[in-house]
Every structure is written in structure tokens, then in C-alpha cells.
Image (cartoon, rainbow, N blue to C red):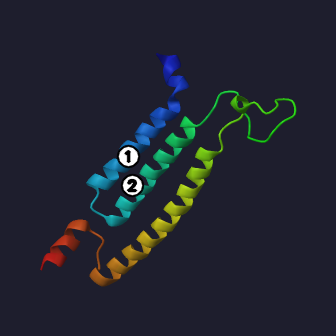
């Protein structure tokens, strides 16, 4: 059992990060803390996706004369490129979200979710 845990420790990390991020999004009342929870959740998804694309004994996808052109000897670069794109998009979305949170705080004086909902109902 211990060998299985050692071999798959990254998946345990991913589950822990998913749990922390989801808990922050669902439980926290402060919108900044919810945004931090979303960032943690995103990181867990990125780690999961990259870990799933790792190939044992794979090498970078640059043709090596010693290995030849056998596709099985090389790692697929597509998952890494997709995650890199997702990271860039996530950073942009977080920037917009932070700008909106600043605007909400200037307008309403709070970032508490329940307080904002109460103020908007009246």
C-alpha cells in the first residue's frame, strides 16, 4: 500500500488542493478569499493535467539521431502547451476579477458576500 502512495503522491496532492479550493469557494464569505480558492482549484487542475501527460522514459519532442523518429520515445508537447495557454487566460481572468473586486469595494465598502446581497436587495 505504501508503494502505491509513493507512486501516486501527486494525485493525493491534487485531491488535497481540489478540496481546499472547493471549500474556500463554497464556505468563505469574503470575495477575495473565494478568488484565492478558485486559484488553488485551478492550480490543482493544471497539476492533474500535466501529471497525466507524463510518460515514463519519454524525452523532449526534439528528434534525436540516437533515438530516431519513433513517436513512442517522445513526450507529447500538446498538454503542456494547453496548460500554458490556460495559465495565461487564468491570469487575465484573475486580473479582471481583482479589478471588479476593487470596484465593488469602492462602491459598497465591503467584500462580504452576504452583506452585498443584503445591500442589493434593499
Whether pointer 2 and pointer 1 mark residues with C-beta atoms closer than 8 Å, the reply is: yes
The residue sitting at the right extreme is 65
State the SS at label 1. Answer: helix
Task: Identify residue for label 2.
Answer: 37
State the SS at label 2. Answer: helix
Rendering quarter of residue 97: bottom left
For marks 2 and 1, give the CA distance: 7 Å
Quadrant occupied by the C terminus = bottom left
- List x then y, in percent, for residue 46: 51, 47
- List x then y, in percent, for residue 42: 45, 52
Q: Residues within 10 Å of mark 1 (few under 14, many from 20)?
A: some
- List x then y, in percent, for residue 36: 41, 58
> Taking 76 as reference, is 112 left or right?
left
Rendering quarter of residue 108: bottom left
Task: Identify residue for label 1.
Answer: 20
**Looking at the image, which is closer to me, 90 or 23?**
90
Q: What residue is shown at x 71% (from left), y 33% (from top)?
A: 71
Figure check: 51 above or below 93: above
Q: Residues within 10 Å of mark 2 (few under 14, many from 20)?
A: many
Q: What residue is shown at x 13% (from left), y 76% (from top)?
A: 121
Amino acid at each position: 500500500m505504501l508503494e502505491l502512495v509513493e507512486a501516486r503522491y501527486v494525485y493525493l496532492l491534487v485531491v488535497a488542493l481540489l478540496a481546499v479550493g472547493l471549500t474556500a469557494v463554497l464556505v468563505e464569505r469574503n470575495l477575495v478569499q473565494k478568488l484565492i480558492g478558485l486559484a488553488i482549484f485551478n492550480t490543482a487542475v493544471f497539476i492533474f493535467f500535466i501529471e497525466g501527460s507524463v510518460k515514463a522514459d519519454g524525452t523532449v519532442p526534439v528528434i534525436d539521431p540516437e533515438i530516431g523518429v519513433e513517436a513512442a520515445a517522445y513526450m507529447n508537447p500538446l498538454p503542456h502547451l494547453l496548460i500554458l495557454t490556460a495559465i495565461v487566460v487564468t491570469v487575465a481572468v484573475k486580473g479582471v476579477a481583482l479589478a471588479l473586486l476593487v470596484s465593488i469595494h469602492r462602491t459598497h465598502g465591503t467584500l462580504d458576500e452576504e452583506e452585498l446581497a443584503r445591500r442589493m436587495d434593499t
